[in-house]
Image (cartoon, rainbow, N blue to C red):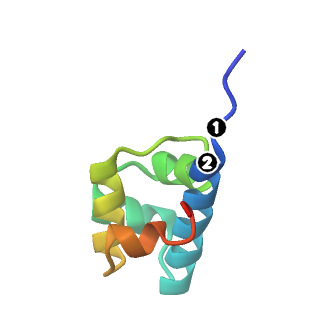
Amino acid sequence: MSKPMQPVYRLLGAKVEMMRNTLGWTQEELAVRIGLSRASIANLETGRQRLMMHDVEKIALAFGTTPKHLMKGIWT
């Protein structure tokens, strides 16, 4: 039986998806910018994939922001 993902991953994934859509990027475009697969982006956005901190930093930099801003509101 698989372990359910923690809410932090669903919240981070939803924020990544919202920011990506705001920029008008596809999952493939974000994947290329940060060096992950499109499938990884899809899994990340649905909260099915955990992220390493260096990947959070890559995503934030691709969006032109900081990891702190990307994580704002996720951990209080």
The answer to whether residue 41 is above or below residue 48 is: below
13 and 66: which one is in front?
66
Query: Do residues under tags 1 and 2 come within 8 Å of each other at their CB atoms?
Result: yes
Residue 72 at x, y = what percent? 49, 72
Disc 2 residue type?
A: Gly
Q: Which residue is mark 2?
A: 47
Q: Secondary structure at mark 1?
A: loop
Give the Cα distance between marks 1 and 2.
7 Å
The mark closer to the camera, 1 or 2, is 1
Residue 32 at x, y = what percent? 32, 61
The residue under the point 35% across, 67% down is 67
The residue under the point 40% across, 66% down is 30
User: Which of marks 2 and 1 precedes in the sequence?
Assistant: 1
The answer to whether residue 69 is above or below residue 67 is: below
Residue 4 at x, y = what percent? 69, 32
Q: Could you say which disc has been placed on residue 31 in the image?
A: none
The residue under the point 64% across, 53% down is 10
Corner quadrant of residue 6: top right
Q: Which residue is mark 1?
A: 5
69 and 41: which one is in front?
69
The residue under the point 66% across, 48% down is 7
Corner quadrant of residue 73: bottom right
